[in-house]
């Protein structure tokens, strides 16, 4: 009935009646459960959004990254110290070598001959030094003995001269005087005996004295004459002895003079010892110089074998057997793959929180998402642009502030077993987790 009334009213154009207010409908238990689930989902979604936002905010706040980084290493350039022809090349390009391994050989014959010549020169110099040392010892011994002998001869000559002088004095004062006195006495006795003989001779003729007495006087005269002759002979001998003693004294004086001369000569020869010692020192210095030349020759000979100074991979080998190489010429380079590091150029605005020892992660395009762990080793003392060959200068006044980049050295830990190796020159991305 009500529906019909309403339809009818609409048909005749009467005003639309106000809808009746219906009583609130009662919700079912399923509707209330769905509402609770929706509210819980909205709450969880809000919490997850907050956590994700916080994680993103914290992660962005505690790490800095850059893709302006490359792998570096202390690459060693191998060159030669001597000139010569290459006789053998042992290694090839991209071959791994250990420190001390032989790389190549230079023809050693010229340097071997120089070493042998230096060895001979050293042997000669050493023998000369030894001879000079022996000569010093011999000169010292001979001159010392000569000086001692000369001094002894001088002492003997002085004693002989003193004895000769004493003999001269003794002969002149005692023996000669006694001989002269004896001659005088015998002369007087002989004179008296001869006078008696002269007196007795006439008396014999007159028979005033007997022949017996005359014979006695005559015998006495002969004895006196003989004694006088003997005394005169003794005087002559004494005189000769005096002359001989004087001659001996003169000879002793001359010998003393010669002994003194020999002493002076020996002492002069003794002064030769320092000269011999100086010659020995000079010979010794020559031996040391020859030894140094020998060591240099041996050292140059050892340079004919060029060995690897470090361990790594051989690259850029430019030398071939038969090539003539000169000192300083680059032969090859060795890249130490176990000692690589990364130079990351961070903006100056990113350096405030970077510290030595911070953990770093390195990614290379070669290995995709593989991560290499590293640690910050050091931060450069200046920007990269200031270390350029031509540092930028701005004196025009048109200054434009440009954010500079500062190199950061990062040590990378590589696992050789993984097969992933970073090589110098590779571009990488670096992320540093700061405190």
Image (cartoon, rainbow, N blue to C red):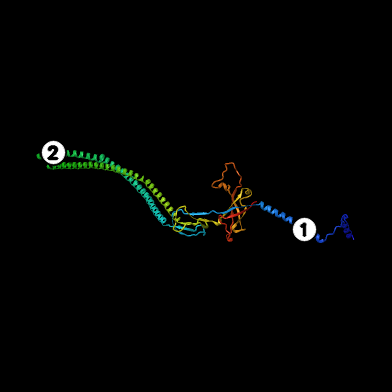
Kindly indicate the quadrant of the structure image that contains residue 396. top right
Q: Which mark is residue 52?
A: none
The reply, left or right, for residue 12 in relation to residue 381 is: right
Of the image marks 1 and 2, the number of the one nearer the N terminus: 1
Kindly indicate the quadrant of the structure image that contains residue 262. top left
Residue 195: image location, x then y, percent: 15, 38
- Could you tell me if residue 201 is visible in this image? yes
The reply, left or right, for residue 231 in relation to residue 415 is: left
Kindly indicate the quadrant of the structure image that contains residue 212. top left
- Could you tell me if residue 159 is visible in this image? no
Within 10 Å of the Cα at label 1, are there few (<14), some (14-19), or many (20+) other Cα atoms? few
For the N terminus, which image quadrant? bottom right
Dot 1 falls on a residue whose secondary structure is: helix
Q: Which residue is denoted by mark 1 in the rendering?
A: 38
The reply, left or right, for residue 254 in relation to residue 325 is: left
Task: Tell whether label 2 touches label 1 (CB within 8 Å).
Answer: no
Q: What number of labels is visible?
A: 2
Q: Real-space Cα distance between discs 1 and 2?
A: 203 Å
Judging depth in this view, the residue of 281 and 216 nearest the camera is 281
Residue extending farthest front = 12
Which residue does the image show at 9% across and 40% down from the upper left? 205
Judging depth in this view, the residue of 304 and 272 nearest the camera is 304
Discs 1/2, front: 1
Residue 78: image location, x then y, percent: 49, 55
Residue 319: image location, x then y, percent: 47, 57
Judging depth in this view, the residue of 87 and 171 nearest the camera is 87
Judging depth in this view, the residue of 227 and 388 nearest the camera is 388
Q: Which residue is denoted by mark 2 in the rendering?
A: 198
Within 10 Å of the Cα at label 2, are there few (<14), some (14-19), or many (20+) other Cα atoms? some
Dot 2 falls on a residue whose secondary structure is: helix
């Amino acid at each position: 009935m009500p529906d019909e009334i309403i339809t009818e009213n609409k048909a005749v154009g009467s005003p639309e009646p106000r809808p009746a207010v219906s009583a609130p409908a009662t919700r079912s238990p399923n509707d209330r459960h769905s509402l609770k689930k929706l509210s819980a989902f909205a709450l969880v979604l809000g919490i997850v959004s907050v956590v994700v936002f916080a994680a993103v905010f914290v992660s962005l706040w505690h790490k800095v990254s850059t893709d302006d980084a490359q792998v570096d290493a202390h690459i060693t350039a191998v060159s030669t110290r001597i000139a010569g022809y290459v006789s053998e090349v042992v290694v090839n390009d991209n071959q791994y070598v250990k420190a001390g391994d032989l790389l190549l050989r230079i023809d050693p014959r010229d340097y071997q001959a120089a070493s042998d010549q230096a060895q001979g020169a050293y042997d000669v110099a050493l023998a000369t030094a030894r001879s000079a040392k022996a000569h010093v010892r011999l000169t010292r011994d001979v001159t010392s003995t000569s000086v001692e002998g000369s001094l002894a001869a001088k002492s003997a000559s002085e004693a002989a001269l003193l004895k000769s002088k004493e003999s001269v004095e003794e002969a002149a004062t005692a023996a000669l005087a006694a001989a002269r006195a004896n001659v005088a006495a015998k002369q007087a006795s002989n004179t008296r005996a001869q006078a008696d003989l002269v007196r007795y001779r006439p008396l014999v003729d007159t028979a005033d004295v007997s022949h017996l007495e005359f014979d006695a006087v005559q015998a006495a005269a002969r004895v006196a004459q003989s004694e006088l002759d003997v005394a005169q002979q003794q005087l002559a001998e004494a005189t000769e002895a005096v002359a001989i003693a004087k001659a001996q004294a003169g000879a002793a004086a001359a010998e003393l003079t010669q002994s003194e001369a020999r002493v002076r000569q020996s002492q002069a020869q003794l002064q030769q010892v320092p000269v011999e010692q100086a010659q020995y020192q000079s010979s010794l210095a020559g031996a040391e110089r020859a030894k140094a030349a020998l060591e240099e020759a041996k050292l140059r000979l050892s340079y004919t074998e060029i060995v690897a100074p470090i361990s790594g991979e051989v690259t850029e080998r430019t030398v071939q057997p038969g090539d003539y190489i000169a000192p300083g010429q680059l032969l090859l380079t060795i890249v130490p793959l176990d000692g690589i590091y990364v130079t990351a150029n961070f903006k100056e605005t990113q350096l405030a929180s970077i510290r030595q020892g911070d953990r770093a992660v390195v990614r290379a395009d070669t290995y995709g998402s593989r991560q290499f762990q590293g640690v910050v080793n050091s931060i450069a003392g200046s920007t990269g642009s200031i270390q350029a060959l031509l540092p930028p200068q701005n004196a025009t006044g048109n200054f434009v502030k440009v954010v500079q980049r500062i190199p950061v050295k990062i040590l990378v830990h590589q696992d050789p077993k993984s097969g992933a190796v970073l090589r110098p020159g590779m571009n990488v991305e670096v992320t540093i987790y700061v405190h």
